[in-house]
Image (cartoon, grey):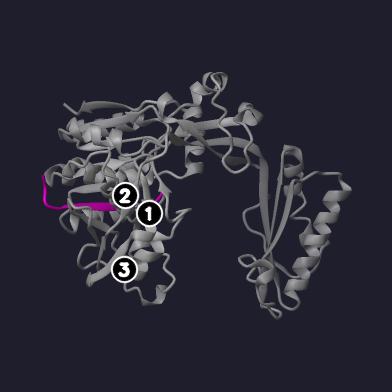
Amino acid sequence: MKSVIRIASGQGFWGDWPQAPIHQVRLGPIDYLVMDYLAEVTMSILKKQQLRNPELGYARDFPELMEEILPDIVERNIRVITNAGGVNPLACRDRVLEIARRKGIQVSVAVVLGDDILADLDRLLAEGHELRNLDTGEPLSTIRDRVLSANVYFGAAPIVEALRQGAQIVITGRTTDTGLTLAPMVYEFGWSWEQYDLLAAGVVAGHINECGAQATGGNFTDWYRVPDLARVGFPIIEAYPDGSFVVTKHEGTGGLVDTFTVREQLLYEIGDPRAYITPECRADFTSIELEQEGPDRVRVRNVRGGPPTEFYKVSISYSAGWKATGTLVYAWPDAVAKAQAAARILKQRLDDLGLVFEEFRVELVGVNACHETIAEPVQDPNEVELRLSVRSSDYRSVEEFGRQIAPLILTGPSSVTGFSGGRPRPSEVIAYWPALLAKSVVTPRVVLDASS
């Protein structure tokens, strides 16, 4: 058993800072690089890409990154864990192995399969698994014909199995964000799946790691006291067998690790703080103790946990109509009054055409777009951007909305100074359907391959 391992976060979402994982690998010692690419809506985007091209459906940034750092990974014996596989982990694996063979590098790559249950939905519904929406209680059958993707949130267990089989790179589909960091702790320290306090500690470590620089000063309330955000260091979990760990970052990088940056990340999307539910356990965030151990070092300990539920969470996406957004910029004087009048004129014209929208949204950027009616009134600003958005199940209504924006330039209030992006085009609305599914009916699988 190792006495300590260093687990580095390299990506908080698909589209995060491309240099972050490169810095994590090259600027100091780490044992693991974990990379989170998936949000709920990302799965549906990847599924649509795969339907257009069966060879796609994964985060293409990941193989591009491997082109850059695979030699470093192998030379430094760093293991990589990522959910970049999306809805097509096998294709992602094949791309990585192709890169390795071309570079003459031997590396073992494992994929975790079984989370994609789209093809099984009709059978599961027929067997009585209603997959009711956790927010509304509605059964999935009400929107079954519009479902685009359906993926179970697996946890750390199949990743641990992949590590035990010798994988240096583990590529998964829909895995819990926390599982990416928890897995190497379970694997290296030999924790059992019944040691709930230890598992909960690993879950908390994963929660801190999952959003990249959000734990090291990015998106921080006191952003003004964070040094050198241009070169921000991403978090590293320095983990110990007893479940305690230190949140830190590489020396010489920008950013800040203190009890305040860590606290803010701990509060991110947790629901019930006494029962943060993952496939492995329930973590009690109210038990966490933080201590500033030194510059950019926060020790976390005393995490308590309890047994898991009998369910996996399922992330389902479905088509929910169409939307479009258009913008016009009005200049002083009376910029706000002009923008408000333009919105009223447009709404009247749409009503006169008999168009139907589930939502017609008016935002004045610079006045109320963020805080709406609770914001203090702005007194005659130099300019204001009018942002108009609609949503409808009728494609033609949304399309016609797009045609009606530009005419406001000459048939509405004066002093339009900006009309960017051209005519707004309808885009599909992808809605999220969270549900639960008994763990007993889904089984993850690990497939291991090597570049030579």
**Which residue matches tag 2?**
200
Which residue is rendered at x = 36% and y = 67% of the image?
Answer: 261
Residue 279: quarter of image: top left
Of mark 1 and mark 2, the one earlier in the sequence is: 2
Q: For the residue marked with disc 2, what is the amino acid?
A: Ala
Which residue is rendered at x = 31% and y = 39% of the image?
Answer: 156
- For the magenta stretch, what is the residue range? 1-14
Of mark 3 and mark 2, the one earlier in the sequence is: 2
**389 lies left or right of 11:** right
Which residue is rendered at x = 58% and y = 38% of the image?
Answer: 133
Q: Position of residue 356 (x, y in %)?
A: 80, 44
How packed is label 2: few (under 14 Cα within 10 Å), some, or many (20 or more)? Answer: many
**Which residue matches tag 1?**
284
Of mark 1 and mark 3, the one earlier in the sequence is: 3
Q: For the residue marked with disc 3, what is the amino acid?
A: Gly
Q: For the residue marked with disc 1, what is the amino acid?
A: Asp
Which residue is rendered at x = 55% and y = 36% of the image?
Answer: 317
The secondary element bearing badge 3 is classed as: loop
**Which residue matches tag 3?**
255
Q: CA distance from mark 3 to mark 2?
A: 27 Å
Q: Position of residue 347 (x, y in %)?
A: 81, 55
**Which one is nearer the viewer's eye here, 279 or 218?**
279
